[in-house]
Image: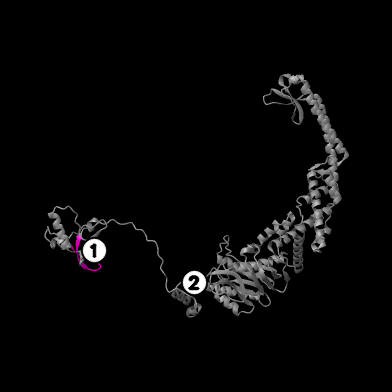
């Protein structure tokens, strides 16, 4: 298998084809299948495939059977060997299959299908098949194969019956000496079970004994005489069987050439019908073959892709156009497109139908491919090194009758240098006069194709509304970069698009994004807050403040008086102008300590409580009313 076959997955096509064949020789022929360089041969192969498919559509699947071992058996017989009943029966079945295949092909003749005339190359050898069928049945020589054999087998049956009757008679006459009531077969001989202590009461030979040794299995003398008679009859039977088998083997050896010719014809038909079955399975058509360096594919499909997702391809090259440069978005189907063209060309030159509505395929002396990363670990080559090594090899081989397929020209290195290399490769391909297809992302390569005679641009279509590739190839148009458009549709702000366009295209950047809608700005999305471990408030800092302390509150830088001590979170209540506020101890700085402002037993309610609150407090104390007093918040 060549590298090109593997890259294009032609090996998988051959696997599918082999599954449709019945004979081992046809499968081996499929494994060796490769493009023919003869226009006459290719057209003949295509015609055979067409006729095979027509036969299948009209008459159903052909009755082809496996021929494994037949040639070897016939060769053995021709050298004087004696075939076994099983081998002879298998050959009889093959001859019967040949007869059915002849009948099948005759029906094709009625429809004037050329392939059906292979029927004339087949000989069912009806007389030999009938002879084999009458003498061999169920993998043994039949009783009626000869009068002598029938007579011998009848004599054997009578003698064996007499042996059993004699053994049973001895058993009944001497039941007092017996360990059981029935005879048995030991080491191929009929025996009676005699108790050990009565061994000498029965005339005969000990053939076997029980596991305990208490029972002896003896062959009575009268039975032994009959046994010897049966053995002599069986020797005569075997000799008669061998005589019959030799006669049948000799009959087949006399027809060796006919049987071998049958095998070759069946194997050839099996191969051709496998191609017809594949054509039917893939809904293929017979392409027009030319030597005018012209390829045209209408609604072509990749033969290995599911039809449900296989977008038809329309492609044409030749008639003054030697190169097609395909551009389009990633995963847009560029690689599938060039593989589809190359694989259909390879299939056509192998005599296989192509899955297209219409197709014109030119003869190619080589299909040269550079697709995939091609990393060569054994030679320690990078992607780019392997790519260039393969490309150089292709350029050496490419000629006017070659088809060259290259994916992502100049990729895997610095974009500026890669672009230059891509154009240099295209120049060399143009000089070779080969037909070539290449995919690229470089805008400079698209421009090169636009202004170069004999090279044309093509693009893979893209739905700008759904932002999805359509996998359709349009010849004659260069693909536009969709990156800015997609970015704008997905919400990139206009100022970012503008900046990106200028970075990519300089002063012409603004023209690249005209008509593209971008957001005014990035809308920040909310994120879950990080849950920090809460740090314990240092008691020393929070509790250093006392009620009455004058403090500076930040960031306002206003003076206030502490009216309540710090809680467990380090928050203190501070009396500001006309209000009380809870403030973190971290935002407070001591201005004047309370002991410097007030006497030791100063009543702070005078400062912090309203007149009404203090009056109520006074009244409660006079009337001995129990209540909880709180400062106003």
Secondary structure found at label 2: helix
- Tell me which colouring the rendered structure shows: one colour
Q: Residue at 50% x, 73% y: name it.
A: 484
Dot placed on the residue nearer the N-terminal end, 2 or 1: 2
Q: Quadrant of the C terminus?
A: bottom left
Q: Which mark is residue 581?
A: 1
Instruction: Pinpoint residue 616: horizontal percent, then vertical percent.
Output: 16, 58
Identify whether 546 is placed above or below 254. below
Q: Residue at 61% x, 70% y: name it.
A: 472
Identify whether 254 is placed above or below 436. above
Instruction: Pinpoint residue 569: horizontal percent, then vertical percent.
Output: 27, 57
Mark 2 Cα shell of 10 Å, populated few (<14), some (14-19), many (≥20): some
Q: What residue sits right under mark 2 in the picture?
A: 489
Secondary structure found at label 1: strand
Residue placed most toward the observer, 534 or 389: 534
Identify whether 446 is placed above or below 103. below
Q: Which residues are magenta?
A: 549-563
Quarter residue 28 falls in: bottom right
Q: CA distance from mark 2 to mark 1?
A: 50 Å
Report the side of 573 relative to 125 (left or right): left
């Amino acid at each position: 298998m060549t590298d090109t076959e593997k890259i294009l997955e032609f090996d998988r096509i051959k696997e599918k084809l082999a599954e449709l064949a019945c004979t081992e020789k046809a499968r081996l022929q499929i494994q060796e299948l490769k493009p023919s360089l003869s226009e006459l041969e290719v057209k003949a192969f295509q015609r055979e495939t067409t006729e095979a498919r027509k036969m299948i559509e009209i008459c159903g699947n052909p009755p082809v059977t496996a021929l494994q071992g037949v040639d070897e058996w016939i060769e053995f017989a021709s050298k004087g060997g004696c075939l076994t009943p099983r081998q002879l029966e298998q050959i009889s079945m093959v001859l019967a299959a040949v007869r059915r295949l002849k009948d099948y092909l005759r029906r094709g003749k009625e429809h004037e299908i050329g392939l059906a005339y292979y029927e004339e190359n087949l000989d069912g050898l009806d007389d030999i098949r009938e002879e084999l069928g009458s003498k061999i049945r169920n993998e043994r020589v039949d009783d009626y194969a000869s009068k002598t054999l029938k007579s011998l087998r009848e004599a054997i049956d009578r003698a064996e019956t007499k042996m059993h009757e004699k053994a049973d008679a001895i058993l009944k006459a001497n039941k007092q000496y017996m360990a059981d009531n029935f005879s048995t077969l030991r080491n191929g001989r009929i025996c009676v079970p005699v108790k050990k202590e009565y061994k000498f009461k029965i005339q005969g030979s000990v053939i076997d004994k029980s596991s305990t040794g208490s029972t002896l299995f003896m062959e009575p003398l009268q039975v032994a005489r009959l046994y010897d008679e049966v053995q002599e009859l069986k020797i005569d039977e075997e000799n008669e069987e061998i005589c019959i088998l030799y006669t049948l083997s000799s009959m087949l050896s006399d027809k060796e050439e006919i049987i071998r010719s049958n095998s070759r014809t069946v194997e050839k038909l099996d191969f051709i019908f496998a191609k017809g079955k594949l054509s039917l399975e893939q809904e293929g058509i017979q392409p027009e073959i030319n030597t005018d360096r012209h390829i045209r594919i209408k609604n072509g499909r990749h033969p290995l892709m599911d039809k449900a997702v296989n977008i038809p391809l329309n492609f044409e090259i030749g008639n003054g156009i030697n190169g097609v440069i395909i551009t389009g978005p990633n995963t847009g189907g560029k690689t599938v497109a060039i593989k589809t063209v190359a694989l259909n060309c390879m299939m056509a030159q192998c005599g296989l139908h192509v899955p297209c509505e219409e197709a014109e395929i030119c003869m190619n002396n080589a299909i040269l491919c550079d697709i995939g990363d091609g990393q060569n670990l054994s030679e320690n080559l990078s992607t780019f090194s392997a790519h260039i090594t393969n490309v150089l090899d292709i350029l050496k081989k490419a000629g006017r009758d070659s088809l060259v397929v290259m994916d992502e020209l100049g990729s895997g290195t610095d974009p500026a240098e890669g672009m230059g290399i891509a154009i240099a490769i295209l120049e060399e391909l143009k000089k070779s006069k080969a037909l070539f297809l290449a995919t690229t992302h470089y805008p400079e390569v698209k421009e090169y194709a636009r202004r170069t005679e004999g090279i044309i641009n093509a693009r893979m279509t893209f739905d700008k509304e759904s932002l999805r590739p359509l996998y359709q190839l349009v010849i004659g148009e260069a693909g536009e970069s969709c990156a800015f458009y997609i970015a704008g549709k997905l919400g990139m702000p206009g100022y970012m698009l503008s900046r990106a366009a200028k970075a990519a295209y300089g002063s012409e950047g603004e023209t690249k994004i005209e008509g593209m809608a971008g957001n005014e700005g990035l809308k920040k999305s909310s994120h879950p807050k990080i849950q920090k471990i809460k740090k314990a408030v240092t008691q020393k800092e929070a509790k250093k403040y006392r009620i009455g302390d004058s403090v500076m509150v930040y960031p306002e830088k206003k003076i206030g008086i502490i009216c309540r001590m710090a809680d467990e979170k380090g928050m203190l209540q501070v009396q500001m102008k006309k209000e009380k506020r809870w403030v973190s101890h971290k935002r407070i700085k001591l201005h004047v300590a309370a002991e410097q402002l007030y006497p030791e037993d100063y009543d702070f309610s005078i400062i912090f409580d309203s007149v009404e609150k203090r009056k109520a407090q006074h009244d409660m104390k006079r009337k001995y009313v129990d209540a909880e007093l709180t400062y106003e918040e």
